[in-house]
Image (cartoon, rainbow, N blue to C red):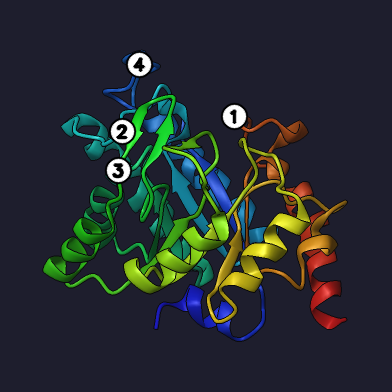
Amino acid sequence: MPRLLELMDSGVKPVIGVVHLPPLPGSPGWRGESLEPILERVEADTRALLEGGAEAVIVENYGDAPYAVRVREPETLAAFTLAARRAVEVAREYGAPVGLSLLRNSAPEAVAVAAVVGAEFIRSNAFCETRVSPEGILEPVARETLLKARLLGWRGAILADVDVKHSLVLGEGYDPRLAAREAVHRCKPDALIVSGARTGEAPEPGYVAAIRESVPGARLVLGSGATPENIRLYWRLVDAFIIGTYFKRDGVTTNPVDKSRVERLMRLVRELRRG
Protein backbone atom coordinates (compact mmCIF):
# COMPACT_ATOMS: atom_id res chain seq x y z
CA MET A 1 0.00 0.00 0.00
CA PRO A 2 1.32 3.52 -0.79
CA ARG A 3 2.71 5.28 2.28
CA LEU A 4 0.24 8.14 2.04
CA LEU A 5 -2.69 5.74 2.29
CA GLU A 6 -1.06 3.97 5.23
CA LEU A 7 -0.84 7.30 7.04
CA MET A 8 -4.46 8.09 6.27
CA ASP A 9 -5.66 4.68 7.41
CA SER A 10 -3.66 4.92 10.63
CA GLY A 11 -5.52 8.04 11.72
CA VAL A 12 -2.49 10.33 11.44
CA LYS A 13 -4.37 12.66 9.07
CA PRO A 14 -1.22 13.57 7.10
CA VAL A 15 -0.56 17.08 5.85
CA ILE A 16 0.45 17.32 2.19
CA GLY A 17 2.24 20.55 1.32
CA VAL A 18 2.05 21.92 -2.22
CA VAL A 19 5.05 22.85 -4.35
CA HIS A 20 3.58 25.32 -6.85
CA LEU A 21 5.81 25.47 -9.93
CA PRO A 22 6.51 28.73 -11.81
CA PRO A 23 5.62 28.76 -15.53
CA LEU A 24 7.19 25.85 -17.39
CA PRO A 25 8.43 25.67 -20.99
CA GLY A 26 5.48 25.37 -23.34
CA SER A 27 3.16 27.44 -21.14
CA PRO A 28 2.08 31.05 -21.84
CA GLY A 29 4.05 32.40 -18.90
CA TRP A 30 7.39 30.85 -19.83
CA ARG A 31 9.97 33.50 -20.69
CA GLY A 32 12.74 31.29 -22.02
CA GLU A 33 15.03 31.48 -19.01
CA SER A 34 17.07 28.60 -17.64
CA LEU A 35 15.16 25.79 -15.98
CA GLU A 36 17.66 25.62 -13.13
CA PRO A 37 16.03 28.38 -10.99
CA ILE A 38 12.77 26.42 -11.12
CA LEU A 39 14.51 23.26 -9.94
CA GLU A 40 16.21 25.20 -7.16
CA ARG A 41 12.81 26.55 -6.09
CA VAL A 42 11.41 22.99 -6.07
CA GLU A 43 14.23 21.85 -3.82
CA ALA A 44 13.90 24.80 -1.45
CA ASP A 45 10.11 24.52 -1.15
CA THR A 46 10.23 20.75 -0.67
CA ARG A 47 12.80 21.08 2.10
CA ALA A 48 10.88 23.88 3.81
CA LEU A 49 7.67 21.84 3.80
CA LEU A 50 9.25 18.65 5.11
CA GLU A 51 11.54 20.32 7.64
CA GLY A 52 8.53 22.26 8.84
CA GLY A 53 6.75 18.99 9.59
CA ALA A 54 4.55 18.17 6.59
CA GLU A 55 4.33 14.42 5.91
CA ALA A 56 4.22 14.62 2.10
CA VAL A 57 4.44 17.05 -0.81
CA ILE A 58 2.61 17.36 -4.10
CA VAL A 59 4.15 19.09 -7.11
CA GLU A 60 1.77 21.11 -9.30
CA ASN A 61 2.29 23.12 -12.51
CA TYR A 62 0.36 26.03 -10.99
CA GLY A 63 2.24 28.67 -12.97
CA ASP A 64 1.17 27.31 -16.36
CA ALA A 65 -2.17 29.19 -16.44
CA PRO A 66 -4.10 29.45 -18.63
CA TYR A 67 -3.91 25.69 -18.56
CA ALA A 68 -4.40 23.12 -21.27
CA VAL A 69 -7.22 20.68 -20.57
CA ARG A 70 -4.63 17.97 -21.22
CA VAL A 71 -0.91 18.69 -21.37
CA ARG A 72 0.42 17.61 -24.77
CA GLU A 73 3.49 19.84 -25.16
CA PRO A 74 6.58 17.60 -24.88
CA GLU A 75 8.66 20.46 -23.47
CA THR A 76 6.17 20.96 -20.63
CA LEU A 77 6.06 17.27 -19.82
CA ALA A 78 9.87 17.11 -19.91
CA ALA A 79 10.24 20.10 -17.57
CA PHE A 80 7.55 18.81 -15.22
CA THR A 81 9.33 15.45 -15.09
CA LEU A 82 12.60 17.13 -14.09
CA ALA A 83 10.83 19.15 -11.38
CA ALA A 84 9.06 16.06 -10.07
CA ARG A 85 12.33 14.14 -10.02
CA ARG A 86 14.03 16.88 -8.00
CA ALA A 87 11.22 16.81 -5.43
CA VAL A 88 11.42 13.01 -5.17
CA GLU A 89 15.19 13.13 -4.64
CA VAL A 90 14.85 15.67 -1.84
CA ALA A 91 11.86 13.95 -0.22
CA ARG A 92 13.75 10.66 -0.03
CA GLU A 93 16.12 12.28 2.44
CA TYR A 94 13.12 12.75 4.76
CA GLY A 95 11.38 9.48 3.96
CA ALA A 96 8.37 11.36 2.60
CA PRO A 97 6.15 10.49 -0.39
CA VAL A 98 5.73 12.84 -3.34
CA GLY A 99 2.61 13.33 -5.42
CA LEU A 100 1.91 15.03 -8.74
CA SER A 101 -0.88 17.30 -9.96
CA LEU A 102 -0.66 18.06 -13.67
CA LEU A 103 -3.22 20.73 -14.47
CA ARG A 104 -5.76 20.89 -15.72
CA ASN A 105 -6.87 17.33 -16.14
CA SER A 106 -3.78 15.35 -17.15
CA ALA A 107 -4.00 12.45 -14.72
CA PRO A 108 -2.86 9.81 -17.26
CA GLU A 109 0.17 11.95 -18.07
CA ALA A 110 0.81 12.44 -14.36
CA VAL A 111 0.80 8.67 -13.85
CA ALA A 112 3.40 8.33 -16.62
CA VAL A 113 5.65 10.91 -14.98
CA ALA A 114 5.09 9.34 -11.56
CA ALA A 115 6.11 5.93 -12.86
CA VAL A 116 9.32 7.38 -14.31
CA VAL A 117 10.44 9.47 -11.31
CA GLY A 118 9.11 7.38 -8.43
CA ALA A 119 6.25 9.59 -7.25
CA GLU A 120 3.73 7.74 -5.11
CA PHE A 121 0.41 9.49 -5.71
CA ILE A 122 -1.39 11.84 -8.10
CA ARG A 123 -4.30 14.26 -7.97
CA SER A 124 -6.97 14.24 -10.68
CA ASN A 125 -9.33 17.22 -11.06
CA ALA A 126 -11.99 15.49 -13.16
CA PHE A 127 -11.56 11.79 -12.56
CA CYS A 128 -15.23 10.84 -12.67
CA GLU A 129 -17.17 13.98 -13.63
CA THR A 130 -17.69 16.20 -16.65
CA ARG A 131 -17.05 19.81 -15.66
CA VAL A 132 -17.15 23.23 -17.32
CA SER A 133 -13.98 25.15 -16.53
CA PRO A 134 -12.16 28.27 -17.77
CA GLU A 135 -9.95 25.91 -19.76
CA GLY A 136 -12.88 24.18 -21.47
CA ILE A 137 -14.82 20.98 -20.88
CA LEU A 138 -13.09 18.59 -18.50
CA GLU A 139 -13.99 15.02 -19.38
CA PRO A 140 -13.56 12.08 -16.98
CA VAL A 141 -10.20 10.31 -17.22
CA ALA A 142 -10.68 7.45 -14.74
CA ARG A 143 -10.54 4.61 -17.25
CA GLU A 144 -7.56 6.03 -19.14
CA THR A 145 -5.69 6.75 -15.91
CA LEU A 146 -6.22 3.29 -14.45
CA LEU A 147 -5.22 1.64 -17.71
CA LYS A 148 -2.06 3.73 -17.88
CA ALA A 149 -1.16 2.80 -14.31
CA ARG A 150 -1.66 -0.89 -15.08
CA LEU A 151 0.35 -0.68 -18.31
CA LEU A 152 3.30 0.93 -16.53
CA GLY A 153 3.05 -1.17 -13.38
CA TRP A 154 2.57 1.94 -11.25
CA ARG A 155 0.97 1.08 -7.91
CA GLY A 156 0.59 4.55 -6.47
CA ALA A 157 -2.50 6.23 -5.06
CA ILE A 158 -5.05 8.28 -7.00
CA LEU A 159 -6.70 11.22 -5.22
CA ALA A 160 -9.77 12.37 -7.15
CA ASP A 161 -11.58 15.68 -6.77
CA VAL A 162 -15.33 15.85 -6.37
CA ASP A 163 -17.04 19.08 -7.46
CA VAL A 164 -13.58 20.43 -8.24
CA LYS A 165 -12.75 24.10 -7.68
CA HIS A 166 -12.62 26.61 -10.55
CA SER A 167 -15.34 24.73 -12.42
CA LEU A 168 -19.08 24.21 -12.67
CA VAL A 169 -21.17 21.15 -13.29
CA LEU A 170 -22.43 20.49 -16.81
CA GLY A 171 -26.22 20.31 -16.54
CA GLU A 172 -28.75 20.74 -13.75
CA GLY A 173 -29.68 18.83 -10.63
CA TYR A 174 -26.11 18.23 -9.48
CA ASP A 175 -25.71 16.58 -6.10
CA PRO A 176 -22.09 16.34 -4.87
CA ARG A 177 -23.10 13.56 -2.50
CA LEU A 178 -24.27 11.42 -5.41
CA ALA A 179 -21.16 12.39 -7.39
CA ALA A 180 -19.00 11.22 -4.49
CA ARG A 181 -20.80 7.89 -4.28
CA GLU A 182 -20.55 7.36 -8.02
CA ALA A 183 -16.85 8.18 -7.94
CA VAL A 184 -16.13 5.70 -5.18
CA HIS A 185 -18.15 2.83 -6.60
CA ARG A 186 -17.68 3.28 -10.35
CA CYS A 187 -14.31 5.00 -10.84
CA LYS A 188 -12.48 3.59 -7.83
CA PRO A 189 -9.99 6.26 -6.75
CA ASP A 190 -8.03 5.66 -3.56
CA ALA A 191 -9.34 8.85 -1.94
CA LEU A 192 -11.69 11.74 -2.68
CA ILE A 193 -10.79 15.43 -2.42
CA VAL A 194 -13.22 18.15 -1.39
CA SER A 195 -12.25 21.80 -1.72
CA GLY A 196 -13.60 25.33 -1.84
CA ALA A 197 -14.62 27.19 -4.97
CA ARG A 198 -11.18 28.70 -5.56
CA THR A 199 -7.52 28.13 -4.72
CA GLY A 200 -6.90 28.90 -1.07
CA GLU A 201 -10.60 29.01 -0.17
CA ALA A 202 -12.06 26.56 2.33
CA PRO A 203 -15.36 24.76 1.75
CA GLU A 204 -18.18 25.06 4.24
CA PRO A 205 -17.78 22.46 6.99
CA GLY A 206 -21.38 21.39 6.46
CA TYR A 207 -20.65 20.67 2.80
CA VAL A 208 -17.67 18.50 3.79
CA ALA A 209 -19.80 16.73 6.38
CA ALA A 210 -22.44 15.93 3.75
CA ILE A 211 -19.81 14.38 1.49
CA ARG A 212 -18.41 12.46 4.46
CA GLU A 213 -21.83 11.04 5.29
CA SER A 214 -22.47 10.00 1.69
CA VAL A 215 -19.28 7.89 1.48
CA PRO A 216 -18.66 6.70 5.04
CA GLY A 217 -16.04 4.11 4.10
CA ALA A 218 -14.01 6.26 1.72
CA ARG A 219 -10.86 8.23 2.44
CA LEU A 220 -11.55 11.97 2.28
CA VAL A 221 -9.03 14.78 1.83
CA LEU A 222 -9.54 18.51 2.37
CA GLY A 223 -8.07 20.03 -0.77
CA SER A 224 -7.95 23.76 -0.06
CA GLY A 225 -8.29 26.47 2.53
CA ALA A 226 -6.96 24.87 5.70
CA THR A 227 -5.36 27.32 8.17
CA PRO A 228 -4.56 27.29 11.90
CA GLU A 229 -7.77 29.27 12.43
CA ASN A 230 -10.12 26.73 10.84
CA ILE A 231 -8.46 23.31 10.76
CA ARG A 232 -10.29 22.20 13.92
CA LEU A 233 -13.58 22.50 12.01
CA TYR A 234 -12.51 19.77 9.60
CA TRP A 235 -10.41 17.55 11.84
CA ARG A 236 -13.02 14.86 12.44
CA LEU A 237 -14.43 15.07 8.90
CA VAL A 238 -11.40 14.22 6.74
CA ASP A 239 -8.43 11.87 6.66
CA ALA A 240 -5.76 14.21 5.24
CA PHE A 241 -5.12 17.83 4.27
CA ILE A 242 -3.60 19.37 1.13
CA ILE A 243 -2.25 22.78 2.10
CA GLY A 244 -0.70 25.19 -0.36
CA THR A 245 -1.57 28.87 -0.01
CA TYR A 246 -1.34 29.14 3.78
CA PHE A 247 2.20 27.73 3.74
CA LYS A 248 3.47 30.45 1.40
CA ARG A 249 5.15 33.68 2.46
CA ASP A 250 2.42 36.20 3.40
CA GLY A 251 -0.16 33.60 2.37
CA VAL A 252 0.33 34.34 -1.35
CA THR A 253 0.07 31.21 -3.48
CA THR A 254 2.89 32.09 -5.88
CA ASN A 255 5.40 32.97 -3.14
CA PRO A 256 8.03 30.55 -1.79
CA VAL A 257 7.16 28.31 1.13
CA ASP A 258 7.56 29.97 4.52
CA LYS A 259 8.91 27.31 6.87
CA SER A 260 7.70 29.20 9.95
CA ARG A 261 4.11 29.03 8.70
CA VAL A 262 4.47 25.29 8.14
CA GLU A 263 5.80 24.87 11.66
CA ARG A 264 2.98 26.93 13.14
CA LEU A 265 0.25 24.83 11.57
CA MET A 266 2.03 21.55 12.27
CA ARG A 267 2.29 22.40 15.97
CA LEU A 268 -1.48 22.66 16.04
CA VAL A 269 -1.85 19.44 14.04
CA ARG A 270 0.28 17.57 16.56
CA GLU A 271 -1.93 18.90 19.36
CA LEU A 272 -5.03 17.70 17.54
CA ARG A 273 -3.49 14.29 17.04
CA ARG A 274 -2.79 13.97 20.75
CA GLY A 275 -6.28 15.21 21.59
* Residue 69 - label: 2
Residue 199 - label: none
The correct choice, above or below, for 272 with respect to 143 in the image is below
Give the residue type that dot 3 points to.
Answer: Glu
- Marked residue nearer the N-terminal end (1 or 3): 3
Secondary element type, mark 3 = loop
What whole-number distance in Å separates the C-alpha atoms at marks 3 and 4?
23 Å
- Label 1, secondary structure: give it: loop
Residue 157 image-quadrant placement: bottom left
Q: Position of residue 200 (x, y in %)?
A: 67, 39
Which numbered disc, 1 or 3, marks the residue closer to the eye? 3
Most extreme residue toward the left is: 151
How far separated are the C-alphas under marks 2 and 1?
Answer: 21 Å
Say which residue label 4 marks.
28
Q: Is residue 152 visible to the viewer in this orientation of the structure?
A: yes
- How many residues crowd around disc 1 within 10 Å: few (fewer than 14), some, or many (20 or more)? some
Residue at 53 percent across and 76 percent down: it is 218
Which sits in the foreground, 233 or 117? 233
Q: Quadrant of the C terminus?
A: bottom right
Which residue matches tag 1? 254
Residues packed near mark 4 inside 10 Å, few (<14), some (14 to 19) or many (20 plus): few
For discs 3 and 2, the disc positioned in front in the rendered view: 3
Q: Residue at x 49, y 40 (%)?
A: 172
* Residue 125 place in picture, x, y as percent: 42, 47
Q: Nearer the viewer, residue 234 or 89?
A: 234
Badge 3, how many Cα within 10 Å: few under 14, some, many 20+? some
Of callouts 1 and 4, the N-terminal one:
4
Residue in front for this viewpoint, 213 or 190: 213
Is 188 rendered above or below residue 82? below
Taking the spot 56% from the left edge, 61% from the top edge, the residue there is: 177
